[in-house]
Image (cartoon, grey):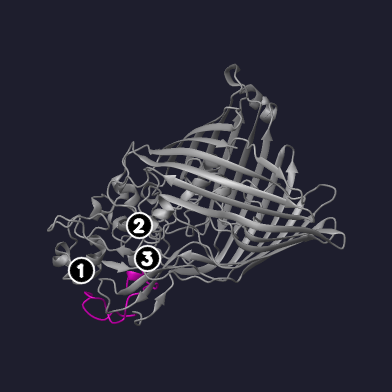
Amino acid sequence: MTTTIRKSWHFQPSLMRLAPLSLAITTAVGTGTFAPQAHAFRFELDNGIEGNFDSTLSLGMQMRAEDRDCHYIAYDNGGCANFKADGDLGLINSDDGNLNYNKGQLISQALRGTHDLYLKAPGGWKALVRGAWFYDFAVDDTQRTDIPRSARNIAVRDAEILDAYVQKEFDIADQPAKIRAGKQVVTWGEALLTFGGINAINPLDLRKANSAGVQLKELYRPTPIFDFSTSLTDNFGIETYYQWGFDEHILPAKGTYFSTLDMASPGSTAVFSGTPALTGGTLPAAGPPGTMGDDGTIDATTGSTISLEDRLSGNFPGAQNILGGVGSAIGRSSDKYKKGGQFGLAARYTFEDSGDQLGLYYIRYHEKTPAIGLIVDSTANNPLGYRSYFVNYAADRDLFGISYNFRVGDWSVGAELAYRPNDVVLIDQTVPQVAASKYSCLPANGTAFSGGPIAGGKADGTVCPGYLETERYQATISGLSILRPDSFGGLIGALGASDGMMIAELAVSHLPNLDLSAAAPGENGSNEAFGTHVPYPINYDAAAPTRTTAGVAISTTLTYPNAFGTRVSLVPELGINRGLYGSPAGVFPGFSKNVGSVTTALNVDFKTDPGLTARVDFTHFYGGGESNPMLDKDYLGLSLTTSF
């Protein structure tokens, strides 16, 4: 079964609410899989080196298709979310992107290019260098907060080298072998549309997951890897790799449309406290909307935007009656991650008679999803008692996997099972601020306005990592079929299509030892008293998760050549993503019951030389109520792409 078709997803955190990553997987297949056939510049040198140079240019735009919903806007920013959702640090640190773009406004208008140089030399030598660049003319036309200067190279403009490797092919004992070294993508396992299984090697560039005109090969971030593979017999082979350095998932930049994690996104410098989060202790009551706010808040006394420096120091009049001069923000310190130490081993056996393939895998990897760590300091000039927060990437995780692929009629089917004995489950950063919680991370000496010591608190200098460890299993089964007119009992032909493709995938995740002991009896954890909640951050409504979750993703295209008597081909496309069971505690695969997305698209291939295609698509998010931060973010996309 082929494993070259890859997709991506919506990264949708609130605090660390990384809500359904799978939602964008089905939309991203459409964003970049349909591209014109490149007509490369080919060359051959006298020394035997030959190569080709391919370029792809695209101009794409996206528009917000619905009004923002006040339930996803923090109380301090004029929102109407209920207390459970707004009483923590979630919405105040996740709504910048929602506030920055109005219905009917372009959220992106980007010119993009990718350029591939492929070389082949005598003696089994090969090399590939791939670069990409873009400039977005609309993303920084924001309504409320500017795109931070430090994030403009993520959101507005960028140029980067993606792949850059050298490969040598040779024989060992009459069996083929290959070494590849440099920036590259290594994909293992059978999953095509979901993440969280065996394929844990390369990070993702999630800022591109919903961008018009992006190709799938741009979504996986090539990283420095030394990869070696060889056949030991005609049917059995092994592959091993070592990954040096560390690269994380790139999140959408702070303040952009799809960003829902203001505190960890590129450009973030602080986490802000809203007034509902500051009630209790010595505080008389919550302040009126706008008393604290975030980057875009206007001080009611001065009429000017409150600076980060003022919020860190407490030097702004609007908060004096609530905080008494204590700052309402916590600054960000350096990220914590480990370089090097990532490696893996795969063994694959192909059955001679059937062509089926069995794979076994071991991967040592570092977590690429950010957790929010805290450093305790009772003397800190903020109401929560933290010296700073930091983005934390857990190191030295283990993964064991098994896969099997086979054919059933017209379908190529792949199945895999991944086991992670020490998987990372993120902690909602409201929970450490609750003294009654067993996950509390408050200072023993008290905070700036706690009124005294806190029983069971932590000593100054304590580092709270922002995550828990638990076992996780994930089973995935995928099917891919090249459709013909007689497929599905002749349905494809009856629809007038000449051919097509369908991919369907079911993913089930199970955390057998997930701690649910803090859930409120009979209420699935959705009690207003935060101290009774389990610590997991997926749902805005703070409902307890389930140990098992499941969902399905489907992507289908049909081809209509010579449309209306012309040489033009039309390729309509449908992508469906839906959670079938459960409420997730972890990021992957991100399915939540009855929550999903639908993408409809029309691709047009003009059959020109050089190639020219057009695409129009619409994505609708549904289900989950206040626990789905994408529910008011439907969008329309349009792109033109040429390759030469």
Q: Is residue 455 magenta?
A: yes
Where is residue 524, by image quadrant?
bottom left
Question: What label does residue 263 carry, if any?
Answer: none
Residue at the outermost front position: 46
Q: Which residue is drawn at 53% across and 65% down?
A: 367
Q: As shown in the figure, which amino acid type bears the numbered disc 3?
A: Gln
In the rendered view of the protein, which quadrant contains the C terminus?
top right
Which residue is under mark 2? 149
Q: Going from the N terminus, do you reach mark 2 or mark 3 first? A: 2
Disc 3 on helix, strand or loop?
Answer: loop
Q: Position of residue 336 (x, y in %)?
A: 46, 71
Q: Nearer the viewer, mark 1 or mark 2?
A: 2
* Earlier-in-chain disc, 1 versus 2: 2
Between 368 and 130, the one lying in front of the other is 130
Q: Is mark 1 on a helix, strand or loop?
A: loop
Specify start and end residues of the magenta stretch as a single range: 431-456
- Name the residue type under label 1: Gly
Q: Which of 546 and 92 is in front in this view?
A: 92
Which residue is label 3 attached to?
429
Query: Is 326 covered by the magenta stretch?
Result: no
Residue count near mark 2 (Cα–Cα under 10 Å), binned few <14, some 14–19, many ≥20:
few
Q: Marks 3 and 1, how far apart in space?
A: 22 Å
Q: Residue at x 34, y 64 (%)?
A: 269
- The kind of residue on which mark 2 rests is Arg
Q: Residue 314 — which label?
A: 1
